[in-house]
Structure formats: structure tokens, C-alpha cells
Amino acid sequence: MPSKKKKKEKKIPVLLLEDIANLGQKGEVTLVKPGYYRYLKSLNKVTLASKEKLSKELKPFLLTEKIKKREKKLNELKEKIESLVLNFKISQYYKNITKEKILKALKENNINISKNQIQLDQKLDKEGEFIVKINLGFDIIASLKIKIVKI
């Protein structure tokens, strides 16, 4: 009597449209069995992740997820910058605070931005408190407080 071989089910690549326990998070591509795919598809929790779909229809979906994550990180960075107060000392030899000095002080506080993100509207060469705007992108602008003391 010939033995019956079990037919091996092929798994299907799907894109998760929401977080599913024991399977993955929203935006991930994972493999599932055809029956499970049909079940999840009926609940509108997944879509088929063929190369054509990923490149055409799903690219904007994946892009918006990346943008949301990036905006979240930038908002966290904004909070970190706004909770900070940078203290500088000026004398007759070191008369003004430059973007480079601000950048160096931010790096010492584990904040990495580029020089062109710092918006200096005025010269920082007097004693007092100043607010410097830092453009983080995505229309997120942080206000950095700077205190300058004469020595």
C-alpha cells in the first residue's frame, strides 16, 4: 500500500496592517499559512505582500510609518533640547557665542544636530538670557535657552 505524503503548505508573505500578537507589528512583512491569511484578510488585518504591491500600493503605507517614527523621535529630541539650559561665559577676548560653540555644547549633552539647523537671529555677545531656535525638520522647532555671563 503506497504511503500518502502530507502535502506541505506553502506560506504566503503578508504585510501586517496592525499589530498582531505572536505574529508581528504593524508595517512588518511576515509569512503565514494560506488559511490564516484568509482569516486575517477577512478581518482587514493583513494584505498580500507581493513585490508589485509592495512597490506600488504599499510603499506610501510603509513611508508614512517611517515618517511617524521619525516625527516621534524629533519630538523627543525637542523636549530634551527645551529642558536644557546652556551656560556660556564671555570675556573681552571671547566676545560672542557662535553656532560652533552651541553645537559643541549640545554634543556634550548627547544631542547631535547639524550646524545649519541652528537659527541665530541675533548676535550672542551680551550678558543675559537668550532663546535660540533649532529647526529639527518636519516643522518641528525647538527653543534652546542660553545664559551668558560676563567674567
Image (cartoon, rainbow, N blue to C red):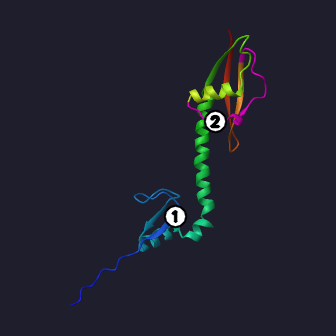
Q: What residue is drawn where x is 43% and y is 68%?
A: 32
Name the residue beneath numbered marker 2: 113
Q: What residue is drawn where x is 69% and y is 34%?
A: 115
Identity of the amino acid at label 1?
A: Leu
Identity of the amino acid at label 2?
A: Ile
Q: Is residue 122 left or right of residue 135?
A: right
Residue 114 inside the magenta-drawn segment: yes
Q: Is residue 99 left or right of residue 35?
A: right
Q: Residue 45: in sight, yes or no?
A: no
Which quadrant of the rendered structure holds the N terminus? bottom left
Name the residue beneath numbered marker 1: 15
* In this view, the mark in front (2 or 1): 2
Q: Measured from the top left, where is residue 104 in percent x and y?
A: 62, 27
Q: Is residue 19 left or right of residue 8?
A: right
Q: Residue furthest left?
A: 1
Dot 2, crowdedness within 10 Å: few (<14), some or many (≥20)?
some
| Number of numbered discs visible in the structure rendering | 2
Which of the 4 quarters of the picture holds residue 8?
A: bottom left
Q: What residue is drawn where x is 24% and y is 85%?
A: 3
Q: Residue furthest right?
A: 122
Q: Measured from the top left, where is residue 95 in percent x and y?
A: 74, 16
Q: Is residue 108 left or right of residue 137?
A: left
Q: Tell me which segment is drawn in magenta.
A: 110-128
| Location of residue 44 with respect to 96 vertically, above or below | below
Q: Residue 110: in sight, yes or no?
A: yes
